[in-house]
Image (cartoon, rainbow, N blue to C red):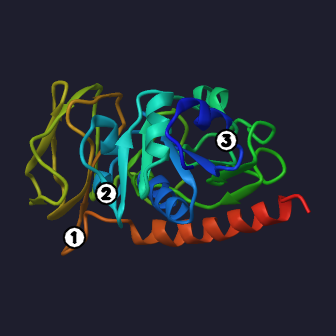
Amino acid sequence: MNATSFPYFVSANDADVAVILGTNEIASALAVKLRKSGYHVILSHEPCPPVLRRGMAFDDALYDDPCELEGVSARRAEDAVHLAEIAAEPACVAVTPLHLSDLLALRRIQVLIDARLKPTSATPDYRRYVGLSVGLGGHFIVGENCDLTFEAAPAYCAALNHCNVRQPCESGDAPDDPAFAVAPGRGVWHTALDIGATVTSGDLLGRIGEFSVRARLDGVLVGLVRDGLALPEGSPLAEIAKGKTAARGLDPHAKILAKAALTAIKGAAKRRAPK
């Protein structure tokens, strides 16, 4: 895309635009791979569940905090004009509060990836509206609600008895994993800690409503929900890793998934190209 004007953005058919639903670590790894491959990438924010591994994700760009992963930066796009400006910038992706319905109204989307990782069977089928529909998670089925699918699950699902969508988490791990902290009640989450902080079992991680939330493990905070968010009971709040663990940069498992997804997307696009 070689122009920043809004008319060009909505009319250019030669520009490969990829929309990713979600701003978590897996969505962000996909965004990096796609942008480096030449796609103009838009991440659509999903507030539920909140992003835990923010040091590995572009989620904070929504709040105008600096975000960069492996040479690719993210900026908040408030509207279509901002989307056009960011899409023209090299090594940059857009993070927006605009919903998919808003983006579909603007222009054709070549690739749509649902990376929200919600364990729910209510999965919309967007195949007729986009060039290629990709779904992450076991609730996607090729030929029924997507063109491509990949197995993926957020690590923090192991910490929840019920996800925010009020469906059982699809995880074989125990729901009371001490590495995770979840909201014992609803309220506004407040914490003075940051990603990468070292904590000891019993340390105060933060407060939500009238409840105090404490660490149940010694280690490093690799996941921490952003301060000031209003959250329902059962929301993931923090993740603690033992020993020296990287809390920032692309998640290694997400990078592997993103590489495989990009290969599959390119292959599918090549097969669909007019001869």
Which residue is located at x 69 percent, y 57 percent? 149
Q: Which residue is mark 3?
A: 12
Residue closer to the observer: 228 or 204:
228
Q: Is residue 133 above or below residue 228?
A: below
Rendering coords of residue 65 (x, y %): 24, 43
SS at circle 2: strand
Residue closer to the observer: 176 or 54:
54
Q: Along the horizontal axis of the image, is 100 left or right of 247?
A: right
The amino acid sitting under disc 3 is Ala
Rendering coords of residue 49 (x, y %): 42, 38
Q: Which is more N-terminal, label 2 or label 1?
A: 2
Q: Which residue is mark 1?
A: 242
SS at circle 3: loop
Q: Which residue is mark 2?
A: 68
Q: Which is more N-terminal, label 1 or label 3?
A: 3
Rendering coords of residue 93 (x, y %): 44, 49
Q: Quadrant of residue 262?
A: bottom right
SS at circle 1: loop
Q: Nearer the viewer, mark 3 or mark 1?
A: 3
The amino acid sitting under disc 2 is Glu
Q: Quadrant of residue 210?
A: top left
Which residue is located at x 48 percent, y 47 percent? 88
The amino acid sitting under disc 1 is Lys
Q: Along the horizontal axis of the image, is 91 left or right of 145?
A: left
Outermost residue on the right side: it is 275
